[in-house]
Image: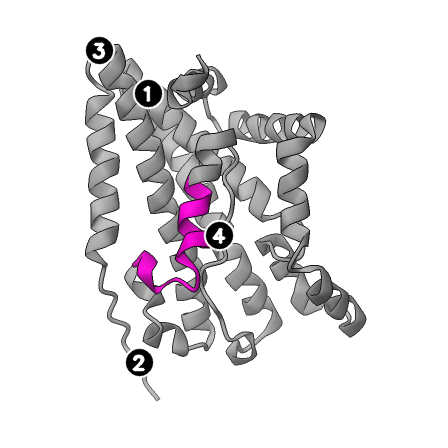
Amino acid sequence: MPRRRLAIQVSPIFLLLIAITVAGGVLCTFDNEVMLTTGVVLLVLGGWAVSLCLHEFGHAITAFRGGDTSIENRGYLTLDIRRYANAQMSFVLPLIFLLLGGIPLPGGAVWINHWAIRSKPVRSLVSLAGPLINLVLGVALAIAVALVPMPVGLLVGLSYLALVQVLAFLLNILPVPGLDGYGALEPWLSQPARELGERVRPWAPLALFALLFLVRPVAQVFFAVGTLLFTVLGGDAEAAGYGYSQFVFWQR
């Protein structure tokens, strides 16, 4: 039986998010402090929003290819935030968290019928697909900054956006129930372990985020590990730090 052809229709909202990101990048090229700061904010917020859509698309397209054809009917392959299970939790809150503390809060946007996925390895891959999208974006941006001559404002904005992607990858792959790292391990766990994971799933991510926001040493370790990984992958930590200072301009 021939494989069903998949027609992906990109949402105009996703294209708008890309346009906002590009507009921010353009503003970053101007030699004006206000325009540069505005550009970095738009570039990072727009780029983070785009990556949230791509992250969830990664989960969805992998699940579809793995056997869950209901994904297409739910509209998850359109990159449209209105189709997500909870747009506020999956889209709005991550933007707010990024603004408040620089922590790329993961979203839980797409509902997947894991029983329709044909094997344990594919179930794990479905969970890993989203974080891997963030990692690929982070590496691609870091390489672009390293190889392509560009104005300083754009360089620092893209560097910080690249760091955000790497931090998002690191946070998502933690083996905490409710996060993608645990989702990749879950198919291989025993039944009692899975039942325990289900019981703690509703509050485990909240406890983790509370630690990151309220316990300074925990946040310092997380950002130190994330920055080290970013540097190993070719990122410019100093440029990213300057981009961060532009992004949280009210703290200067």
Q: Is residue 188 left or right of residue 32?
A: right
Residue 176 visible (yes or no): no
> Marks 1 and 2, Cα distance to the nearest angstrom?
43 Å
- Which mark sits nearer the N-terminus, 1 or 4? 4
Q: Residue at x 56, y 79 (%)?
A: 115
Q: Amino acid at mark 3?
A: Asn
> Marks 1 and 4, Cα distance to the nearest angstrom?
27 Å
Say which residue label 1 marks: 155
Q: Residue at x 78, y 66 (%)?
A: 193
Q: Is residue 56 left or right of residue 207?
A: left
Say which residue label 3 marks: 32
Q: Quadrant of the N terminus?
A: bottom left
Q: Amino acid at mark 1?
A: Leu
Q: Are the residues tagged 3 and 2 within 8 Å (C-beta)?
A: no
Q: Amino acid at mark 2?
A: Arg
- Which mark sits nearer the N-terminus, 3 or 1? 3
Q: Residue 107 got which mark?
A: 4
